[in-house]
Amino acid sequence: MPDNYVNLDELATPSPIENPDENQLYIHTSLEEAKNKEQDYQRNQERERRESIARGEQPKEEKKEEAETEKVSRFATQLYTISYLILFSFLGTLARLGLQAITFYPGAPVVFSELWANFGGSFFMGFLSEDRMLFKNEWGTPTYDQQIEQAKKHGQDEESGSGSESTIDLQAAKKAHNATKKTLPLYIGLATGFCGCFTSFSSFIRDVFLAMSNDLPTPLNHPDDYGRPTASTTATVHRNGGYSFMALLAVIITTIALCISGLYIGAHIAIASEPLIPSLPFKFCRKILDRVAVFLAWGCWLGAIFLAIWPPDRHNDPPEIWRGRAVFALVFAPLGCLGRFYASLYLNGKIASFPLGTFAVNILGTAVIGMSYDLQHAPLGGVVGCQVMQGIEDGFCGCLTTVSTWVSELSSLRRRNAYRYGAASVIVALCFLIVIMGSMQWSTSFSTMQCTH
């Protein structure tokens, strides 16, 4: 695995449940501590490499890489990782759009349907972070099972003091397993790709602004076909600034509280269902699944581009609704997912107490979704232009921004840093939308979108 992959906070954050066995004594590890240890390790490795070169010796790491050339290819690892990110960006986007469609119905208790996608992605992130069964056979060494067997043998004689040794062995097994699974392209694709694209920070902040401005769409009638619901704001009534402020707080508090709860519930379910979860075969994943994912991911992306250019309903009555519902979103989704991936690689390691990469993509994606929303509600561009903007919002912005990683960082940072980071993310993003969307809404007002007719 490339060294800068450790800057992905989906991989660096400690497990949400650090004491699953409820031991009386345990050591809490924060995200800052994990990053500082990794940076110290990298500095020590670099110093040893320079000293070896100064002595005219070959560095140990280069010897190790030469010995493992046949086992692991650095280029293949990166290719598999990028392919999984592309593939799971499609699946995460479709899951988000589908969940929005089935939770946006007449009489819905929660009208901002993005909430359930953010909850689901956070739930799955918590499950992955605590799961120790899906990838237990990776690299052909089931170390977790071996350590458990050793722990059981030591635990047979509690009077001899082996109980503490059993706990230490088990904790070592869990730590070794977590370190192993986080090097796998499939795991990175699931955590960074699927969970990150299933959730959307930019849509969350957009709902916050719409709630504040009394423009949050309310489902008033069920669609004739199983497509995009007809959104209308005619049921809204005039309200004062105090009520709008309460609406703003309602969206923020509900979303953050439920997503953090989802993270911990997913981790609890992974612990409780451990005996029931199957394990992925090592040879099948490495020899077949990784290679198939390369062709499947790039082929699906190319297919989405072809569908956007030549939609299947081209000869039907206008408008061509295929592109507006999901196709344009699938075209832009991999760009957002890969942008977030590389931003995390190069920026998250800069400040241990403030994940700069996640913050930057969340703010950038929120600004872009605000501009796209304005262009959608301006009387220009026609139906196709409106559909392209919808694809940028659902695909690019939805995959560039993430709530699952954000709440995972909030749960693992030290308390003061977590509140500072969370408040800065919400306030700065909302200020961007107030300037971008508010300047249009409170001057010329939004026109009706042409792609909803």
Image: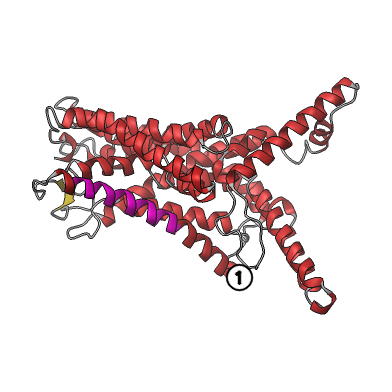
Magenta span includes 138: no
Q: Which residue bears the numbered disc 1? A: 275
Q: Give the range drawn in magenta.
A: 244-262
Going by the image, does 225 lie left or right of 34?
left
- Mark 1 neighbour density, 10 Å: few (under 14) some (14–19) many (20 or more): few
Q: Identify which residue, 276 or 365, lies in the foreground.
A: 365
Q: Can residue 331 be seen in this view?
A: no
Q: Is residue 288 visible?
A: yes
Residue at the far front: name it. 416
Q: Identify which residue, 56 or 210, lies in the foreground.
A: 210
Looking at the image, is 233 positioned above or below residue 57?
A: below
Q: In which quarter of the image is residue 175?
A: bottom right
Q: Is the magenta stretch mostly helix, strand or loop?
A: helix
Q: In which quarter of the image is the N terminus?
A: top right
Name the kind of residue labelled 1 in the image.
Answer: Pro
Q: At which x and y percent is residue 373?
A: 24, 33
Q: Identify which residue, 30 or 285, lies in the foreground.
A: 30
Q: At which x and y percent is residue 168?
A: 75, 62
Q: Which residue is drawn at 85% across and 76% down?
A: 160
Circle 1: element type: helix
Magenta span includes 245: yes
Q: At which x and y percent is residue 315?
A: 20, 36
Q: In which quarter of the image is residue 162?
A: bottom right
Looking at the image, is 343 positioned above or below residue 255?
A: above
Q: At which x and y percent is residue 326?
A: 32, 41
Q: In which quarter of the image is the C terminus?
A: top left
Q: In which quarter of the image is residue 221?
A: bottom left
Q: Identify which residue, 405 or 31, lies in the foreground.
A: 31
